[in-house]
Image (cartoon, grey):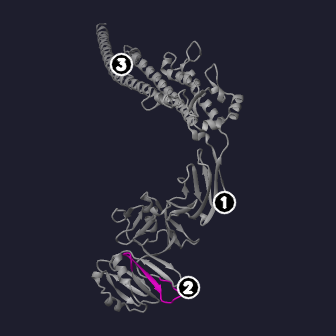
C-alpha cells in the first residue's frame, strides 16, 4: 500500500514529508523473512512429494513386469486358425486351451429397429395420444405424460426424438429425410444393444403396419390406436369415428373398430357394439369397404384383413381423419445369437462370445447364419525374450530414478531430493537385493533355484541389468519357455509369500511403507501451508499498523511545517510593518 504526504506553503512545495511506502516496505522485508522461509520449505516439500510419486509409479511398472513374468499364462502363447473367416472371427489370449472345435452359427444377435414414415417434414405432428408416448427396454418403461416431458398431441417428430434420446437408455431416435424433395420424412427408433432382453417396445402413437398380399396370402394391416381428443376423428376403411366429449382412449378406439364385417354400415355398428359417448364416441359416417377386422390385439390394436383374398388392394388401408397416423416398418427385432459349438447349443445376447473355451473369443458376423467353420487353437511362438527385456527395462528405469534422487554432492553435481535422507528410499535397494537372489520353480515335486544370469539377465556393477543373448539362447535350448509356462517365483522358496511381488506390494500398496511416507509428507505440507496462512494474516496486520503509524507521523510533520510557515509569514509581516 503506497502512502505519501506532501504539503505546500505560500506556493512552495513542503519538503518535510516522509516516504511512508518506502519505509514500510523496508521494514516488511525484514518481517517477511520467516514467511519466505516457510514458502521455501513448502516448495521443497512439494518436490519431495512429487519425487515420491515418481518412485511409486516406477515401482508399479516394475511390479507389473514381475507379475507378468510370474504368470504362467504369459508364456503359454497361443494361435488360432479359422477355416471360414466369413462366418466369424476368432482370437485367443495367452493361456487359451489348445484344441480343435466346430462352430455352426444358427443366428446372430440383433437389436430392435423401427421406422415410422408418412411424415411430410421434420416438424410434422408425431401423433401422440393424450395418454402420452411410452417406450420400454430392459424392464424399464418411460411415459411422456407421467414424466412431465412437455410432449403433447401437437408435438413434432423432432421433439419426440429429442425426448427419447434425453432418457439416456439403450435406445436412440433420429429423424431422417427420405427423399431429395424434402417431402417425405421418417422417425427411426433403434435399440443400441442386441439380445432379446434388450428389446425395445413403444406405444402411444397411431400407427398402421401393412403386410401386402401376394399370390398366396391376403393383405393385412395392424392398426395401433392412441387416445383421441374430444371431437377428433379417425377415418379407416371407409368408416369415420368421432371421439366423444371426454375423448376416446386407445382401448375404446380398438374396441370400436374390432370385429366389423366388410360392408357394415356405421349406424348398424353403433347399435351392435353399443357405442356411445360413454364408450368414447360413435361412428358418424361411412361403410366398411374392402376390409374386415378381427378382435382386439393386446389392448389397443386391431388387425384389418383384405376382403379380396390372394390379391393386393390398389388402395391400401389409409386414414383421412384428424388423428395423425404413421406407417410402421419393423426393420429389426431384438434377438439372441445362437451357435452350435462342438454339437452343443449356446445362445448369448451379444455376437461376441468368450465364455465357452478359456481364452477364445468369437465374433459372429452378420452373414454367418446357418454356416459352419472349424476353429483350431495351437501353441504360439516363444515370447520369453520379450518378457525378459520388459523386466530389464522396468528395473533399470526404477534404479536410474533411485540413483538420481539419492545422489549427493560427493557423487553428483546435482544432488537429489533425498541426498540428505537416502534411507527414505531404502526399500528400492532391498528390491535390488531380492532380485539378485534369482528365481525358483517346481520340478518333479522339488523346488529348484536358478540365477537370473542363467535366463539371460546380467546384473551390472552400476546397479543396472542387461540382456545376455548367449545365456538366453542356451536357456531356450534347455526348455526355458516350458519352465516359465509352468510358473516361477522371484524368491528362493518356491512361494509368492516371501517373493519380490509381495515385498513391492508391502511397500507401495494401499497400506505400504511408501504410501505412509507420502501421506506423512503431505500432512507436513498441509501444516506448513496452515502456518503460512496464519503468518500472512499477522504480517498483513503488521503492515497496516506500520502504515497507520507512519502516515500519522507524516501528517504531524505536515501540520508542524504548516504552522512554522504561518508563523514565519506573520513575523515577516510585522517586520515589514515596523520598517
Q: Is residue 313 magenta?
A: yes
Q: At 59% across and 48% down in the image, what residue appears?
A: 97
Which residue range is magenta in the image?
Answer: 296-317
Residue identified by numbered label 2: 216
Disc 2 is placed on an element classified as: loop
Viewer-nearest residue: 280 or 462 = 462
Q: Position of residue 38 (x, y in %)?
A: 41, 20
* Residue under numbered circle 1: 84
The earlier-in-sequence mark between 2 and 3 is 3
**Quadrant where the N terminus is found in the figure:** top left
Res. 294 image quadrant: bottom left
Q: Main secondary structure of the magenta part?
A: loop
Q: Report the mark closest to the observer, 2 or 3.
A: 2
Whole-number angstrom distance, CA of label 2 to CA of label 3:
115 Å
Which sits in the foreground, 399 or 33?
399
* Mark with earlier residue (1, 2): 1
Q: Nearer the viewer, residue 546 or 185?
A: 185
Contact (Cβ within 8 Å) of mark 1 with mark 2: no
The x and y percentages for residue 185 are 52, 71
What residue is disc 3 on? 7
Q: Position of residue 100 (x, y in %)?
A: 63, 54
Between disc 1 and disc 3, whose residue precedes? 3
Q: Is residue 228 visible?
A: no
Q: Residues within 10 Å of mark 3 (few under 14, many from 20)?
A: some
Image height of 200 relative to 526, above or below = below
Q: Is residue 542 above or below residue 568?
A: below
Q: Nearer the viewer, mark 1 or mark 3?
A: 1
Query: For residue 197, what is the image quadrant?
Result: bottom left
Side (left or right) of 164 relative to 282: right
The CA distance from mark 1 to mark 2 is 38 Å
Q: Residue at x 59, y 14 (%)?
A: 411
Amino acid at each position: 500500500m503506497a502512502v505519501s504526504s506532501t504539503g505546500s506553503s505560500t506556493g512552495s512545495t513542503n519538503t518535510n514529508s516522509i516516504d511512508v511506502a518506502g519505509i514500510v516496505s523496508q521494514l516488511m522485508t525484514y518481517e517477511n523473512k520467516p514467511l519466505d522461509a516457510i514458502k521455501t520449505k513448502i516448495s521443497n516439500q512439494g518436490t519431495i512429494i512429487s519425487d515420491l510419486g515418481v518412485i511409486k509409479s516406477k515401482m508399479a511398472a516394475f511390479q507389473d513386469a514381475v507379475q507378468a513374468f510370474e504368470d504362467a499364462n504369459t508364456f503359454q502363447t497361443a494361435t488360432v486358425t479359422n477355416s471360414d473367416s466369413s462366418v466369424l472371427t476368432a482370437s485367443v489370449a495367452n493361456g487359451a486351451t489348445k484344441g480343435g472345435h466346430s462352430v455352426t452359427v444358427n443366428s446372430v444377435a440383433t437389436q430392435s429397429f423401427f421406422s415410422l414414415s408418412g411424415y411430410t417434414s421434420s416438424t410434422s405432428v408425431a401423433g401422440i395420444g393424450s395418454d402420452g408416448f411410452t417406450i420400454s427396454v430392459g424392464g424399464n418403461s418411460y411415459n411422456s405424460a407421467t414424466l412431465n416431458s412437455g410432449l403433447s398431441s401437437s408435438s413434432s417428430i423432432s421433439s419426440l426424438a429429442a425426448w427419447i434420446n434425453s432418457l439416456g437408455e439403450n435406445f436412440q431416435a433420429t429423424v431422417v429425410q427420405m427423399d431429395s424433395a424434402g417431402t417425405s420424412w421418417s422417425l427411426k427408433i433403434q435399440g443400441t444393444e442386441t439380445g432379446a432382453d434388450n428389446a425395445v417396445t413403444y406405444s402411444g402413437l397411431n400407427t398402421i403396419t401393412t403386410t401386402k398380399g401376394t399370390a398366396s396370402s391376403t393383405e393385412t394391416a395392424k392398426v395401433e390406436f392412441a387416445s383421441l381428443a374430444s371431437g377428433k376423428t379417425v377415418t379407416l376403411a371407409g368408416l369415420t369415428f368421432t371421439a366423444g366429449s371426454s375423448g376416446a382412449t386407445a382401448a375404446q378406439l380398438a374396441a370400436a373398430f374390432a370385429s366389423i364385417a366388410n360392408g357394415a354400415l356405421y349406424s348398424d355398428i353403433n347399435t351392435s357394439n353399443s357405442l356411445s359417448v360413454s364408450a368414447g364416441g360413435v361412428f358418424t359416417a361411412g361403410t366398411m369397404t374392402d376390409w374386415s377386422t378381427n378382435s382386439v390385439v393386446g389392448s389397443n390394436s386391431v388387425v384389418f384383413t383384405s376382403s379380396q383374398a390372394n390379391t393386393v388392394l390398389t388402395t391400401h388401408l389409409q386414414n383421412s381423419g384428424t388423428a395423425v397416423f404413421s406407417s410402421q416398418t419393423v426393420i429389426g427385432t431384438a434377438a439372441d445369437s445362437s451357435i452350435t459349438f462342438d454339437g452343443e447349443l449356446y445362445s448369448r445376447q451379444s455376437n461376441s462370445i468368450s465364455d465357452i473355451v478359456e481364452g477364445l473369443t468369437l465374433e459372429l458376423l452378420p452373414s454367418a447364419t446357418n454356416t459352419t467353420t472349424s476353429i483350431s487353437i495351437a501353441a504360439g511362438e516363444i515370447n520369453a525374450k520379450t518378457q525378459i527385456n520388459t523386466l530389464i527395462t522396468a528395473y533399470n528405469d526404477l534404479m536410474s530414478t533411485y540413483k538420481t534422487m539419492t545422489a549427493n554432492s560427493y557423487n553428483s553435481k546435482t544432488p537429489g531430493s533425498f541426498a540428505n535422507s537416502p534411507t527414505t528410499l531404502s526399500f528400492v535397494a532391498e528390491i535390488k537385493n531380492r532380485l539378485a537372489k534369482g528365481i525358483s520353480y517346481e520340478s518333479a515335486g522339488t523346488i529348484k533355484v536358478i540365477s537370473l544370469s542363467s535366463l539371460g539377465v546380467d546384473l551390472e556393477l552400476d546397479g543396472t541389468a542387461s540382456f545376455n543373448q548367449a545365456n538366453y539362447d542356451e536357456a531356450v535350448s534347455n526348455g526355458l519357455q516350458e519352465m516359465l509356462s509352468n510358473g516361477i517365483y522371484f524368491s528362493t522358496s518356491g512361494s509368492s509369500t516371501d517373493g519380490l511381488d509381495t515385498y513391492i506390494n508391502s511397500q507401495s500398496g494401499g497400506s505400504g511403507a511408501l504410501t505412509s511416507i507420502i501421506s506423512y509428507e503431505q500432512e507436513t505440507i498441509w501444516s506448513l501451508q496452515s502456518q503460512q496462512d496464519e503468518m500472512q494474516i499477522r504480517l498483513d496486520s503488521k503492515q497496516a499498523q506500520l502504515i497507520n503509524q507512519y502516515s500519522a507521523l507524516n501528517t504531524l510533520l505536515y501540520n508542524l511545517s504548516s504552522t512554522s510557515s504561518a508563523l514565519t509569514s506573520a513575523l515577516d509581516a510585522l517586520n515589514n510593518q515596523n520598517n
